[in-house]
Amino acid sequence: MPAVPEETVLFYRCARRDLVLLKFILEAYEGMSTMSTVDKVAGIVRISIPAGFVADVEGLLKALAGEISLQQATFPPLPETAHTLHSER
């Protein structure tokens, strides 16, 4: 049986005017996902989804795409070393 990932990370492009609304809606579904803004100018957000909620969150995002400017995007994740730069000094 294949291993189930602990979390799924998706990137979306969202109109700047809709970023706060998207965050509030995702937060209302407590525990189903977390959102962080990767590039506020381009409207790129990173959505982390725990195992077991992927289908639910994808369904929610698909429904939201009909209401706000939201589309899945490709965005390279930060290298692992980016998180440890300050601790290596």
Image: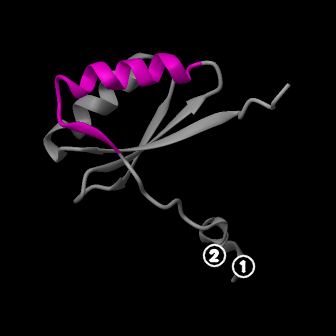
Q: Is residue 59 magenta?
A: yes
In this view, the residue in front, 28 or 80, is 80
Disc 1 and disc 2 in contact, CB within 8 angstroms:
yes
At horizontal 17% and vertical 23% (from top left) the residue drawn is 67
Task: Name the residue: 19% across, 23% down.
Answer: 66
Q: Position of residue 34 (x, y in %)?
A: 48, 34
Residue 85 higher or lower than 51, as above or below: below
Lateral position of residue 58 relative to residue 22, left or right: right
Q: What is the crowding at mark 1: few (fewer than 14 residues within 10 Å), some, or many (at least 20)?
A: few
From the image, tell me which residue sits under label 2.
85
The N terminus - image quarter: top right
Q: Is 76 in the magenta? A: no
Query: Does residue 81 appear left or right of residue 1 in this picture?
Result: left
Percent from the top left, x then y, of residue 13?
Answer: 29, 46
What residue range appears in magenta?
53-72
> Hey, which residue is sitting farthest bottom in the picture?
89
Can residue 30 be seen from the camera position used here?
no
Looking at the rendered structure, the kind of residue marked 1 is: Glu
Q: Tell me the crowding category of disc 2: few under 14, some 14 to 19, or many 20 or more residues within 10 angstroms, Cα based.
A: few
Residue at x 17% of width, y 30% of height: 68
Q: Position of residue 46 (x, y in %)?
A: 44, 45
